[in-house]
Image (tube, coloured by chain):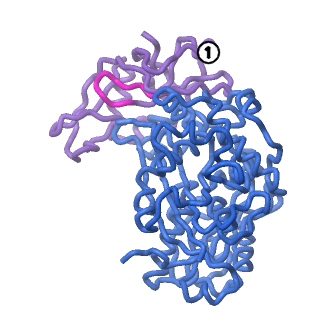
Amino acid sequence: MAYVARKIPFVGTPDTNPETKPYFEGAGAGKLMIRRCTSCKKVHHYPRQLCPFCFNDCAWEETSGKGTIYTLSVMERANPPYAIGYVTLAEGPSMLTNFVDCELGALKIGQDVKVTFVKTEGDGPSLPFFTPV
Amino acid sequence: MSLKGAAYIAGAWEHPTRKAPDKSIALLHAECAKGALEDAGLTKDDIDGYFCAGDAPGGLGPLSMVDYMNLKCRHVDSTDVGGSSYQVAVGHAMEAIATGRCNVALITLSGRPRSEGQATGTAPRPGNPTAPEMQFEYPYGPATANLYGMAAARHMYEYGTTSEQLAWIKVAASHHAQHNPHAMLRDVVTVEDVVNSPMVSTPLHRLDCCVISDGGGALILTKPEIAKSLKRPLVKVIGVGESPKHQMGGNIDLTYTAARWSGPPAWEMAGIKPSDIKYASIYDSFTITVLMQLEDLGFCEKGQGGKFVSDGNLISGVGKLPFNTDGGGLCSNHPANRGGITKIIEAVRQLRGEAHPAVQVPNCDLAIAHGTGGAIGTRHCGSTVILERE
C-alpha cells in the first residue's frame, strides 16, 4: 500500500498556546525542536515549559531528527490510508507522528526513520513527520 | 477507614434500545434512572446524590440533568474519565455514602452516537486546541481504532500475541450475545470470521471492534441499612480502584493499561485475588483492550493474555473465566461510546442469578467489573469495581 498524501488538519494556531510556539517556528525552519530541563537535564515530549519530571524550567534544543519506530497502525479504512505511530527519538522520548513517502505495509517496529516536514492545511504550520532511512 | 462494604448496588438497569433517533439524550438518562429505581424498589424522591460524566447533556456537569429530572440532591459528582467514569462513580458514590453526604446515589449514562451517525473508531474528532496535547496529536489522525491498533501492534511485537488469539475474545462474546435478545450482533462467529473481516486499522479487524449503539444504563447505590430493607438480592461493593495512565513525558509504554494500577487497591480492599473471581466484566472497546486488562488485573502473567483467552477460556460454561455474558461492547451494546456502566450491570445480573440461564455462572458470588476510558494509545483511566453477593 503506497503512501498517498492526505490533507493534514491543524486545530487552533501556533499562537493558541504561547508555551509551544517555538516548536512550530522550528518546524517551519526544518528543525525538530525538543525541550530539555535546565535542572534534571531530561528531555520530554510534547513540549512544556515546566519539566514534567521535576517542574523546573526547560530550554529548547534541536534534535538530530533521527529515531526508530516504537509502534504503528495503518488506518486502512481511511481514504487515503495513513500510518500513525510513535517514533522513539535518538534523544530519548517517543512522539506521535505519521509515516510518509514509503510503502505503508512495509513499515516495521524497530525500523530507523528520519524527520521530514509537511505543511498542514490552509494557514496551518509545518509539522514533523517521519520517513524510513 | 476501609470503604469495603460501605455501599450496595440496589438497582441496575440497562436501556433495551440500541437505536433511539426519536429520543433526546436527557430522556434516555431519565428513562435509565426510572428503570434503576423500579429495579431497586425506590422512588425518585429517595435520591439525594447524583453522579454523571461527560455524556450527560448540558454545559455544567450534573446541573442540567438534576434540573431536568427535578432531583433534590445533597451531593453531585461529574468526574469524567470517558468510558471508565461509571466504575469511578461507584467508588465515589461509596465514599459519599460512607461519609454521610448522601444515602441513595444515582449514576446514569446515556447517548446516541448511532443515531447521530458518528464514525466513532475511524474519524478523528478535533478537540479544544488549548488541551495541551491537541496540536501534537490531532494532525496525525488519532482515531480510536488506530490508537488501540498501536497498542495491539506493540503487544504482538513484544509477546508474540496473534490476531487469532485476539479473535477468541470476539468469539466468546458472540457465544454469549446469541442469548441476548437486545444485542446488536447475535450471530456466533469463528476465529476465521474475525481474522477474515475487513481490516480497520492494523492489526485490528472490523470484528475486533465494539459496536456503535444508542442507549444507556443506570445504577442505584445505597447504604447497607437501606439495601437490606429492599426486596432485591444483596450486591455489596467490596473493592474499588481508579488510576489514570498517560504518556509520561514521552516515556511511552503501550504494553500495559491503567488496570495495573487500579486493580491492586481494589484487590486489597476486597481481600480476594483474581482466582477467586467467578465472573468478569472486562471493558471491550476492542479485543486488545480485554486481553491487556486481563493481564494487568492479574488473571494471567504479562504477555500470556493471548494464551489465556484462547480456546474458549472466556466462554461461560466452557472456560475458566466467563466474561461479558451479555455479549459486551463487542456484540451487544456500547452506549454513548462508553461501556463502563453496562459492565457493572451485567456483573450485578450474574451476582443476582438473573443473567440469561444459558450464560449464568453457577453459584456466582464474586465478580469484577473493570472499565477503561479514553485511549490506551495516548491517555486513559482504568477503574476497577469488585462486587460480592451477600
Chain coloured purple? A
Chain coloured blue? B
Residue B165 is situated, as x and y percent measured from the top left of the image, at 62, 34
Q: Which residues are magenta?
A: A86-94
Residue B174 appears anywhere in the view: yes
Residue B317 is situated, as x and y percent measured from the top left of the image, at 71, 53
Q: Residue furthest left?
A: A39
- Give the residue pinned by disc 1: A4
Number of marks drawn: 1
B240 vs A88, nearest the viewer:
B240
For image coordinates 45% across by 49% down, the residue present is B258
Residue A20 appears anywhere in the view: no
For image coordinates 52% across by 47% down, the residue present is B293
Report if residue A90 lies within the magenta region. yes
A107 vs B306, nearest the viewer:
B306
In this picture, residue A19 sits left or right of residue B103:
left
For image coordinates 56% across by 23% down, the residue present is A83
For image coordinates 73% across by 77% down, the residue present is B39
Task: Identify which amino acid the numbered label 1 is placed on.
Answer: Val
Quarter of the view holding residue A44: top left
In this picture, residue B107 sits left or right of residue A12:
right
In which quadrant of the rendered image does the C terminus of chain B lie? bottom right
